[in-house]
Structure formats: structure tokens, C-alpha cells
Amino acid sequence: MTTGLLLLISTIAFSQKLAPKDRKMEADHTITSNITGKEYLLEISFPKSYSTKDSISYPVLYAVDGKDLTVPSLRAAQKFMMNSKEYEQVIIVGISSAIDRSSWKIDRAQDYTPSIDTLAQKKIETSLKLPGGSLVIGEAAKFLDCIKTEIIPFIDKSYKTNTDRGIAGHSLGGLFTAYCLVNSDGYFTRFGISSPTLTWDNEKLLNQAVIQFNENKTWDLPQTKVFISVGGKDYPNYLYCFVKFYTTLERCDYKNINLQYQIFEKETHMSIIPASMSRILSVLYGKK
């Protein structure tokens, strides 16, 4: 990272703890959100062609659960795929919260869920040995606001980005990504949805999506790419919800939405991650 870029980042008016690592083409930052009150680790991975010496700007893929689930696989895929002219060059920004695994589980249950699911809340509290009623959930709207008004402006001011934005996530992160799609206003135009927890709150988001897709013959969005996947050995109710979601969206045949989906036959809920992240990159950023 150049001295000029470091000076630019240090002047950004946003509550943050800046902790860049001394790596040639990668930078990590820890920022504090005024909206959620949490710290988030941003892991930035640049395409090979990225340079501070030209005026080329790049699309950005934001990946939730970055450090713990999505970013390692996305970076591995990016390293090889982006060397080919068959794919667009893209900056990847992983978004993670907390520093230990138990805190991470608490934070993602709060940030990635769009509604209150009391049964799921009790299960998580029991598994983490938390007092009953202490877990805050259902704040996806607040987290999305944090991404749009704090994290993305920070990235846009610091790096050579354009307004072509994608978002990806797995499991509860996949639920959050599906939430962003269902409530889409065109802010994101590429969605990578991996094994989404559409069972959440008695399938509330899924039911909202089905009603919305069936009632709206057109969808006023810019050209949008959607890739949704699940493991063939995933939980049966996850498979059911996956099929219901994509078949409903597929039947709508929206002209401005390029939908692709895949069942990775021999993969479980967790083993699917490397394959699904690689496929998300290839589908969302393939030129064909």
C-alpha cells in the first residue's frame, strides 16, 4: 500500500480503528460501526491487475462471514480464475465481526437474521450457554444499513471501486444475502447465495419472497445476476426451501435477472463452501 493511500485512509471521517497489515496487495482494516455498535474486520483482496498508478476502477464483491467462512475460499478461487480473460477483475471485501468463535456466533445471529425466531434464539442460547432471552436477533435491516452507509463508503473512498456491487454469504450469511435480494433496490446487482437458512422464523423471508415473486410480473431492477446453491446432503428442510425459492423466482422469468442455481450432490452444509464460493465467482463474474 502506498504512502499516499495510507494518508487518504487516515483522513476518512468514520469511527474506526485502522489496522493495516504490511502486505503488498492486500489490506485489512478494523472499523467500528456507529449503527450496530460493533467492530468489523474488513479483509480486502485485490485482483492481480490492481494498481494505484492508473485510473481503472473495479467492481466489488462483499462477502459476509469473511474471516470464518467465505474469504479463504473466495481468495483461493480469485487467485486462479482472475488470471483468465474469461472473468472480470473484482475486488473482494470480506466482512467479519468479533474475534472469538462464540462472539462471532452471537454477532452473526444478530446481524444476518431479518426477523425474530424465538425457537432458534433459544437453541443458540443453549448451545452457547447464554442466559435465556439475552441473545439479540433479527437486525438484518440495521446491518444492511451499516454496510450501505458506513462500510461501502469507507471502501469507496479508500480504493479504486465503481458502483457495481455484489454480495455473498453462506448459511445465515446466505439468508442475509437472500434478504438483500428480496428487498433489492438495485444497490447490489450480483448475489451469491450459498445454503441459505430460509427455514428461519417459520420460513418468513421465503414466504415473503414467494408472494412477492408471484405478484410482481416485472421487477424494476438493473441487470442483475443471482446464483443460489445448496449441498445435496444438506439438511432436508434447507433443500426444500432452496428448491421453493429458486423455482418460484425461475418461473417469474424476469428479463433483467440472470438466475443460475446448483445442487452440489455430495456436499454437506459445510463441505459445500469451497465449491459454492468458487462457483459464485465464476457465475457472477464470468464474461460469458
Image: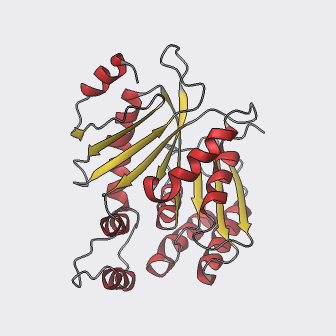
Total number of numbered discs in the rendering: 0
Q: Residue furthest right?
A: 288
| Residue 213: image location, x then y, percent | 61, 63
Is 122 on the left or on the right of 188, as rendered? left
**Quadrant of the image occupied by residue 65:** bottom left
Is 198 on the left or on the right of 252, as rendered? left
| Residue 51: image location, x then y, percent | 52, 20
| Residue 271: image location, x then y, percent | 62, 68
Work out whether residue 220 can be spotted: no
Which quarter shows the C terminus?
A: top right
**Residue at horizontal 66%, vertical 35%?**
82
For residue 2, above or below residue 257: above
**Residue at horizontal 52%, vertical 44%?**
186
**Quadrant of the image occupied by residue 247:** bottom right
Which quarter shows the N terminus?
A: top left
**Residue at horizontal 34%, vertical 56%?**
97
For residue 119, above or below residue 15: below
Q: Nearer the viewer, residue 92 or 79?
A: 79
| Residue 52: image location, x then y, percent | 47, 18
The color scheme shown is secondary structure
Q: Nearer the viewer, residue 211 or 58?
A: 58
Work out whether residue 31 can be spotted: yes
For residue 101, above or below residue 130: above
For residue 253, above or below residue 50: below
